[in-house]
Amino acid sequence: MMRNTLLTLATLGIAVLGLYLLTQAEGSSGLLSAITLIFIWGIAAISLNLINGQLGILSLGHHGFMLIGGYVTALLMLPERERAPFRTRLLSDWARDHLDLDKWLRALGLDYVANSVDLKFVIALFLAGIAAAIVGVIVGAPSLRLKGDYLAIVTFGFGEIIRLLPNAPEVAAFTNGPLGIKGIPGNAGGVWWTFFAFLFVLWFLSRLKFSSYGRAFEGIREDEIAAEAMGVNLAYHKVLAFTISAFFAGVAGGLYASYLQSVDTQTFNFFVTFFLLVAISLGGLGSITGAVLGTAIVVLVRIYGGFLEEAYPAYVGYTGAALLMLGAFAFSAYIRKARRLRPVIETKHYIFGALGLGLLLVAFLFRGEPWMTQTVQFFGMRKILLAVILILIMIYRREGIMGRAEFSWKLVFGPREDIPTEEQRKQDAWLSNPDLNPDLQKEDDDASA
Amino acid sequence: MPLLELRNLYKAFGGLQAISNVSLTVNEGEIVSIIGPNGAGKSTLFNLITGVYRPDRGDILFQGERINGLTPDQVTKKGIARTFQNLRLFTHLTVLENILIPQHHRLKSSWLAAVLRTPTYLKEEEEMRKTALEKLSFFGPRLMSFRLHQPVYVLSYANRRRTEMARAMATDAKLLLLDEPSAGMNPKETKEITQIIRRFRDEGGYTIVLVEHKMNLVGEISDRVVVLDYGEKIAEGDYKDVVNDPKVIEAYLGRREE
Amino acid sequence: MTASKLATRSTMITAFAGLLLLALIGWRIAMLGDYTFARIVQDFLNALTLGSLYALIALGYTMVYGIIRLINFAHGEIFMLGSYFAFYAMTLAPIHWGLALLITALLGGTVLLVLRSLFNLEEPRRTAALALLIFAGTFFLLAFRNMGWIEALLLSMLVTGVAGVLLEAVAYRPLRGAPRESMLITAIAASFFLQNLGQLLFGPRVRGFNAETVLNRPLNFTIGEETVYYTGILIVVPAVTAILLFVLNLFVTRTRLGKAMRATAQDAEVAQMMGVNVNQVIALTFFIGSILAAAAGVMYAIRFGQIHPLMGLIPGIKAFTAAVIGGIGSLPGAVLGGLLLGFIEIYVVSLFPTLSAYKDVFAFVLLILILLFRPSGLVGEDLTEKV
């Protein structure tokens, strides 16, 4: 135990040191941005994992919670100088003047707090989380009545309603409509802020997972009816999970707003939820470690995958698509052979193989034509990649990288706990076999007819 | 005051009358068996008692208190626990976790206290673990030591049944409803379960109602036997009396051709 | 049975809501001074067209859900593909004969293979006949013909139908047995995939879709002193929809395959035991659903004059809402729901112009309300009271 704590502290120390060195290094701003985003989306992913992974309820409205958090943070933290010359055609004067955390704090006489942007952010993010959590209660309520995909659609509906509302004329009084809110201070979007926020959320939600309440959530996931029969109040726990999850989603939204230094109605759309879904499915639904890992991978794809979306001559696309199809054909045949599925190659495989060859042929035959050599912008390749990754996970490895397992030092150093050792096997035999175990033998005497 | 009292219960599903005017009294410390041919409504009765279904008519009283219409978790909190005919364990969780979850409802600490690991919460966790081990020890050393941390899906069928029963005990119930506790067990295991059920009552102080098909088990431990057929109670009493009751024989075997 | 069905709580809620709605509409009409008969007619025609389009798309959702309990998130994208296939058919053809040959070989071959397995045409003579039809027809159209909207419509329906079958084969069939949430996630992924593939292949910009002027030539007429703006498309859409529905109904009730579909929707396992090739039936369901969505896509494009790769999102959700309103799994329900939603959308915007900004929000609100309080929809069985 002592060793584990020391190891954890050591790792933290190394991380802090590494981060510090990185901030001092030249030209590291790209990498730092990526790391910051991993922290921000990591918080969002862990919070989504609470519902989708631990509680076992598919929720598709997470972008709504983040949006609320983002807007609340924006409104509260917008500094004075940004408010006055605001192109506030839509934002009402009331909102502009009164929704100002700075004003409230000074009115309360807490000037020293009001002078610290960081402290103000703590309060603002907390309030943003609370706002999202309140909505979380509403979105979570249907989970008491509905199951499975119907519930998923309802959460999706809520998420979309929340996304559409800021554009509506009446709501724009608070959100400035499609113009969004610009000029948000970026302090909470910096690498240190997000790092410590991430650590806090990680600590908080891990503690929750490994507590009796976490077990209750997982019991609901495993078998709702059994959980209820064992005394778990389904309504309370489901709504609790949604509320906590929404809270941290709101916090993540606020952090993201600070990172971008602006929010508008496009910042938090359904793609955000999809993005998080890919992250936690890839990492392993139910595993916090998995959520973080998945997020890291997905964020890196998003940031460093830009090269995929540049302008290339058209034949690159045709050839690439052809090779992908042929590759998919080969991959699928290999998997089916390995898993001994019959028939190894079906019609659909032939179709894709043929199409792949055909495309190759087209690319070759018409390689001189202008419509082949013109440059084409490869729009949306990263999103395509993410979608393909998710589909592949669902088909081939639904449990993701980590499954439901969590990281622990035991995994790295210790012996495996789930495979019985020779010693344990002997002990197991002893435990169950009355011929070997005198205690059991006594019972057996009573038991023989 | 009887521990459990069912008064003129009725339950219908669409056109099918599943339970028809069933009354039953169970006193503290008794072991009552409910038998009857398949489809007689035995599991439905359990579902009614535990709150999964609401009775159309009639009352269910537990310790004198009317519990109709309570949700299953509320019923469990009152002190009634059940096992399931087809085993509903938390398959991917460990044995220990399966035994800890039923104790969750007794937790006084809030979720925030749990996250912050307040001393009160830590003590409660400690208590829960002790209780868990205590309940598991009912089955001998079988489910202890390294088995505790194994996921339930690696356990043998008999061990799973035992875990399910330990789970029911862990809810801190007074009344245990066991739904075919020996289903799928060989004679030796059945014998063992019989002893254990008796120990539940003798050492653990539980009152037990069980649904069973194995007559030797029923005969050995029941204080009283109740027979259901087509949702009605057709006989009640001592095992010997009930087994020789012509109505019961007819229900199971049909009438002898004259 | 019927009496108890009428008396159930959720039926009463629905009836009450309906009456409230009618009262609201009546009051509003009385309040608006200028809601003339001409406007009623105008709105009616628009609503009929919009509702028909929603109905066509909703049928795809409801059929797929009825058979494999999957909400095909990607159906909106199928709708989009239908528009784009027709667009390219109309704007690109005729093309160089070599390219036409190649495309005929590839696309035609694919279509041939799929249709063969869908409709039990494995017999060599039938395959040959079908092959001749497909290859000759496609080649002719591609190489020589400047396609009109009807040819483009038919071609697009065929190709999109096949695309739907391929989607099912690649993304959904491997998950046949998986928990429904996994299938839903895959459907969402497929939806995003197709959206962005569309952006990649077709370009993200909005494109103008200029159909034959005969359809867009104004056929305005007057009622009283007001003109009702009327173009050919407002006749074509309901007419085509009616034809397709009629054919669909014939197919589902009279043919063996249609009966197999209905049987599979009720109980797939038993249907299989009765000798139904469930894989084929499911593929066929996707085929038909995609055909209808493609038809809707083409007509939608003609009606509104524009296409873009994300055009399937909002109509997709609305059509899904329509399917749920009517009762998901029920074909007449989908049609009813589609028409109803079309009418609600047009009339609400017409009667309450200030609320038009909330148009899409209403669709979602309606969806949530229906799923919460009457998940079986209007025509479906009342599921809420079951234990």
Image: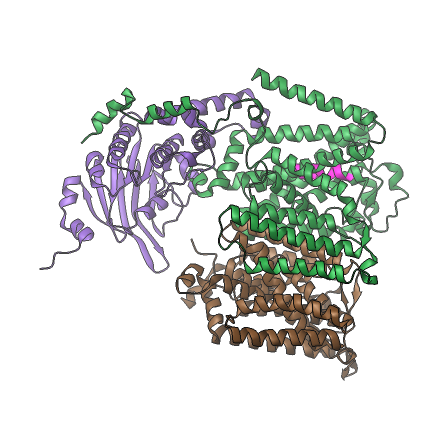
Q: Which chain is purple?
A: B
Q: Picture coordinates of residue A52 (x, y %)?
A: 58, 42
Residue lying at the far top in this picture: please name it: A2
Q: Main secondary structure of the magenta part?
A: helix
User: Position of B91 compared to C132: left or right?
Assistant: left
Rendering coords of residue C162 (x, y %): 61, 65
Quadrant the N terminus of chain B occupies: top left
Residue B140 in the image: above or below residue A165? above
Viewer-side residue, A86 vs A315: A315
The outermost residue toward the right is A85
Q: Position of residue A433 (x, y in %)?
A: 30, 26
Residue A249 in the magenta stretch? The answer is yes
Chain drawn green in the picture: A
Residue A43 picture quarter: top right
- Which image quadrant is residue C85 in? bottom right
Q: How is the image coloured?
A: by chain
* Residue A392 on image: x %, y %: 61, 47
Give the left or right position of residue A411, taking residue A223 as reference.
right
C1 lies left or right of A196: left
- In this picture, is A261 found above or below C380? above
Instruction: Give yes or no for residue C155 being in the magenta stretch.
Output: no
Q: Is residue C56 visible?
A: no
Segment tinted magenta in the rendering = A247-257
In the image, farthest residue toward the left: B258
Residue A390 seen in the figure: yes
Q: Quadrant of the C terminus of chain B?
A: bottom left
Indicate the chain coloured brown by its letter. Answer: C
